[in-house]
Amino acid sequence: MLRTSRRTLLQAAGLGGAAALVGLPAAAQDRSRRPQYHFSVPEGWKNDPQRPVYVDGETRYYYLYNKDYPAPGTGTSWRLTGSDDNVEFRDLGVAIPKETNPNGSIWSGCLVVDEHDTAGFGAGAVIAIATQEDRFAPAPHQQAQFLFYSTDGGRTFGRLDQPVLPNPGVVDFRDPKVIWDDRFDRWVMALAEFDKIGFYHSADLRSWTYVDGFIRGGLGTFECPDLFWIDSDTGPGRWVLGASANTKGSGGVATYAYWTGEFTGTGFVPDRQDPQWLDHGWDWYGAVTWERRVGSQLDTKTRYGIGWMNFWDYPDNTPTWDSDGFNGTDSIVREITLHWYSATESALISRPVRTLADRASRTVRLGDVQVDGNLPLDYRGRAYQIQTRITWSQLNNVGFQLRLSADGSRHVDTGVYRLGNYAYLNRGYTGNPDPTGRWLESRTPFAQGRTEVDLRILVDNTSTEVFIDDGRYTHSSLVFPDPADDLVALFTDGGPAVFHGLTITEFDPV
């Protein structure tokens, strides 16, 4: 069995000359790659999630769907699913089709339940506002916001022919996110406008007035903005402004950037100028958050979140198209809370949705395991959760080899590199979507001198998600192991460690 050193991991990350293993053995191509407990599109293509709403006691989740994939230029519809537990989603078909719409493809937007009939379609109507091309506007300023309405609980939608928010003459003008601000009895829209998030007001969802903008350069083109209030058990509640952003060019990530602060009703004042990130992996993009409800009660301290597990650098690089006829997978649904680490430092933390535990089908409890070097486990699996708290006195590197091949040459690595003071997820020694070898290892800070870490890792057929220290940092990345690679090993370098309460949990397929 290969003993993993930090040099090996650096090589896997492209820093020592090893190439990414994008290709996979031909014999593996006829075996299913469909995720076991993560949501995936039934067939065709999916990308951006749309913020779910609660209707008739269940979560209604819409997403961008292209039945004509991989034919180029064919565009997306909104496809609908329903869920009682935010783990298993029942397909309910296309809700807003592209074929019968004069503006063609329907892009990202959001939904609200118009409880007070502000838009005139009836109390409780489901209203979607989404970006489309306004074909009567001059190119390239055609992105505009259109309104769709449903009076059957969001199953089917009518539309208004004219945009409710025409393009004022800019190229990037998309992905509206609408909330009801009960402090002022009005709707508020956050809109992605290149490096600005614009804020708009409306009384009826049909006409909108620009009021202010939040501008941050150096983060690429904003997409899929988010705006919400969240309370906290550890300090004051805060407004959160988020957006999908791309800092890969400057050595960062491309996931969900966010700021905590104060939303005045017109503008946003951040607590700090630089963003924080809700995920540090390579594949948690276009993410949305939404309210958690327990019965009829709103949980103001917890939000759900879900992200598209892919990115535009390599959107078509997936073996699932050949093996299963689909391209599109989501992260596990998360529960997001606001935690204060001091009087001035707060962050959003993420944990897998608690109802995932209800789907456990098998639990392997290995207790406390002492490791000094490389220790293969007597376990085989392709889709599972692994949890432990690791402690040590002195070492260089500690963690897991997941989806390990029998000869030890292929594996996903995650753990803590003490010499560099960071935690990591490395996909460089297994199948993965990155042909350039630049985005193989993701890293998050790990304080110098610490001698323990909590890890919760979700492994599935095409993804690995790592939750570090109760969700303080999270890494979500696509990985494409050979289906035959199903071993697990623990490793240390430079000293021993104890993996406390080591537990592996398998889940019923969804």
Image: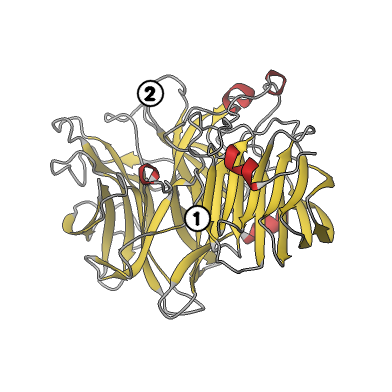
* Image quadrant where one finds the N terminus: top right
Amino acid type indicated by mark 1: Gly
Q: Residue 313 lies in what quarter of the image?
A: top left
Q: Which sits in the foreground, 256 or 208?
A: 256
Position in image of residue 90 (x %, y %)? 59, 43
- Which residue lies at the image location 66% right of the left edge and 68% below the top edge? 451
Is disc 1 surrounded by few (<14), some (14 to 19) or many (20+) residues within 10 Å? many
- Which residue lies at the image location 44% right of the left edge and 52% below the top edge? 288
Instruction: Tell me if 23 is positioned left or right of 276 in this view.
Output: right
Going from N to C along the chain, the mark reached first, 2 or 1, is 2
**Rendered image: mark on residue 276:** none
Label 2 to label 1: alpha-carbon separation: 28 Å
**Rendered image: mark on residue 305:** 1
Picture mark count: 2
Q: Describe the element under mark 1 as helix, strand or loop.
A: strand
Instruction: Tell me if 74 is positioned left or right of 389 in this view.
Output: left
Up the image or down, 431 lies above or below 6; here it is: above
Q: Nearer the viewer, mark 2 or mark 1?
A: 1
Up the image or down, 46 lies above or below 499; here it is: above
Position in image of residue 454 (x %, y %)? 66, 63
Q: Which sits in the foreground, 257 or 332?
A: 257
Amino acid type indicated by mark 2: Thr
Residue occupied by mark 2 = 74
Q: Describe the element under mark 2 as helix, strand or loop.
A: loop
